[in-house]
Image: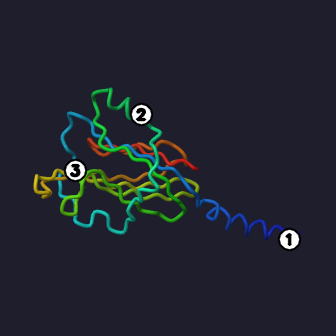
Amino acid sequence: MRLFRSFILLLALVAPPAFADGLYQVEMILFRQLGEPAGTLQYAPEDWNAGARKLDAGNERSPALNDTVRKLQDSGAYEVLLQKAWQQTIGTEKDKVAITSGQERLGHFPIEGTVSLAIARFTDVAADFWINQLDPHGILISSERMKQTARVKNGELIYLDNSNLALLIKVSSL
């Protein structure tokens, strides 16, 4: 009986990380509050995506939060900058994905950033986005930065606020 209890305890300690790895759908909405001054004006670094893997087009999915986007746009108080949905395997170790929008010009995109995700008992999210202004030649003129982290219950819609920029992100098990 003592051996059986030890075996159960060993399974309890080892099993949660093993079961945490799985396939998830991630959806994010990056938006700006209109009429507010830019919070962090600085230049996006050349290595804005350091250590992040590029989001594979084959993993992109149809967004499900279209009603939320519509409500934000219809309010007249917000501008939706980016809506993206994709699937990825997420485990207990952070996995960083590079997200971009627009045409690349001299190493930068109009919108570029990274999302790091890890799931165990809670969902850990770290977002770091740059909204760039590029001149007609592709030279970076200015950037706004949105950088936030959160730890929330699994499967919840997460709101990350950073001055006039904000991010809604939802991680759902597939």
Circle 1: element type: helix
Q: CA distance from mark 3 to mark 1?
A: 60 Å
Within 10 Å of disc 1 (Cα), the crowding (few <14, some 14-19, many 20+) is few
Q: CA distance from mark 1 to mark 2?
A: 54 Å
Q: On screen, 96 above or below 129?
A: below
Q: Residue at x 47, y 50 (%)?
A: 26
Q: On screen, 99 above or below 15?
A: above
x and y percent of residue 104 in the render? Answer: 23, 58
Q: Residue at x 20, y 52 (%)?
A: 132
Q: Which residue is mark 3?
A: 144
Q: On screen, 33 above or below 7?
A: above
- Amino acid type at mark 2: Thr
Q: Which sits earlier in the primary sequence, circle 2 or circle 3?
A: 2
In the image, taking residue 31 as reference, residue 61 lies left or right, namely right
In the image, taking residue 24 as reference, residue 41 lies left or right, namely left
Mark 1 against mark 2, which lies toward the viewer?
2
x and y percent of residue 18 in the render? Answer: 63, 65
Q: Which residue is mark 1?
A: 2
Q: Which residue is mark 2?
A: 68
In the image, taking residue 137 as reference, residue 46 lies left or right, namely right
Circle 3: element type: strand
x and y percent of residue 5 in the render? Answer: 82, 67
